[in-house]
Amino acid sequence: MNKKGSDKIVSVYWFAILFIIAAAVVYMVLIFYGKPYDVREIESSLLAKLVADCVSNAGKINENVLDGSGIILTNENFMETCHLNFGVEDSFDWSLNSEYFVNVEFSMFEGEFLKNVTAGNSNLLDFCKEEFKSANNPSCLEDSFYSLDSEGNAYKIKITSLVRKTEKNVG
């Protein structure tokens, strides 16, 4: 028997298997790292949850939002009261225009509108309209819940949160 001939055939298969494995590893790495993750929906959901926790706790409106004279939360003290920071890295000139927007609407349970409190880039609010929703536009989340004050009055609180960051999150 010719041992050298069979060794050459095995080495050809060996290199073919190594090439297939290397190509598969390269392909998997390119798929995994080739496209940025789009986490804007998660960010807007977390932002809305953070604002909801600031405004209401366990179904009761917080005293830093409502006192005996009415809603004391304003556009000026909203960021500080809710411990929000819309500062982002200076990629893509993001420091010039905020990449975030939050709108909180307070109304009575029966529907009487009371107050609107906003923070961030209000130009982003147009993207919540149905005709502007797409993967390349900011992520918009609208959520509402009911809460009670200390006297048992029911309020409807609607939170709209937007996260833009399309340059970084959309591939």
Image (cartoon, rainbow, N blue to C red):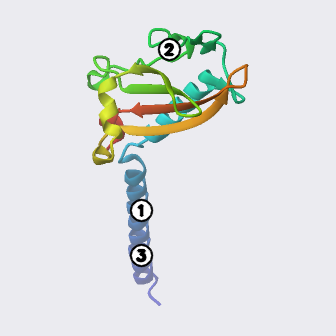
| Disc 2 target residue | 78
Q: Secondary structure at mark 2?
A: helix
- Badge 1 crowding class, 10 Å Cα cut-off, few under 14, some 14 to 19, many 20 or more, is few
| Residue situated in front as seen by the camera: 54 or 111 | 111
| Residue situated in front as seen by the camera: 114 or 89 | 114
Name the image quarter holding residue 60: top right
Residue 159: mark = none
Residue 169 coordinates in the image, percent (x, y): 36, 39
* Residue 88 visible (yes or no): no
Q: Earlier in the sequence, mark 2 or mark 3?
A: 3
Q: Earlier in the sequence, mark 1 or mark 2?
A: 1
Residue 24: mark = 1
Q: Is residue 171 left or right of residue 32?
A: left
| Disc 3 target residue | 13
- Badge 2 crowding class, 10 Å Cα cut-off, few under 14, some 14 to 19, many 20 or more, is many
| Residue situated in front as seen by the camera: 127 or 110 | 110
* Residue 130 visible (yes or no): yes
Q: Residue at x 47, y 90 (%)?
A: 1
Q: Against 6, is 163 above or below?
A: above
Q: Secondary structure at mark 1?
A: helix
Residue 59 coordinates in the image, percent (x, y): 70, 30
Q: Against 147, is 78 above or below?
A: above
Image quadrant containing the C terminus: top left
Q: Amino acid at mark 1?
A: Ala
Q: Earlier in the sequence, mark 3 or mark 1?
A: 3
Residue 28 coordinates in the image, percent (x, y): 42, 56
Q: Secondary structure at mark 3?
A: helix
Q: Spatial distance from mark 2 to mark 3, Cα to Cα?
A: 68 Å
Q: Amino acid at mark 2?
A: Phe
Mark in the foreground, 3 or 1: 1
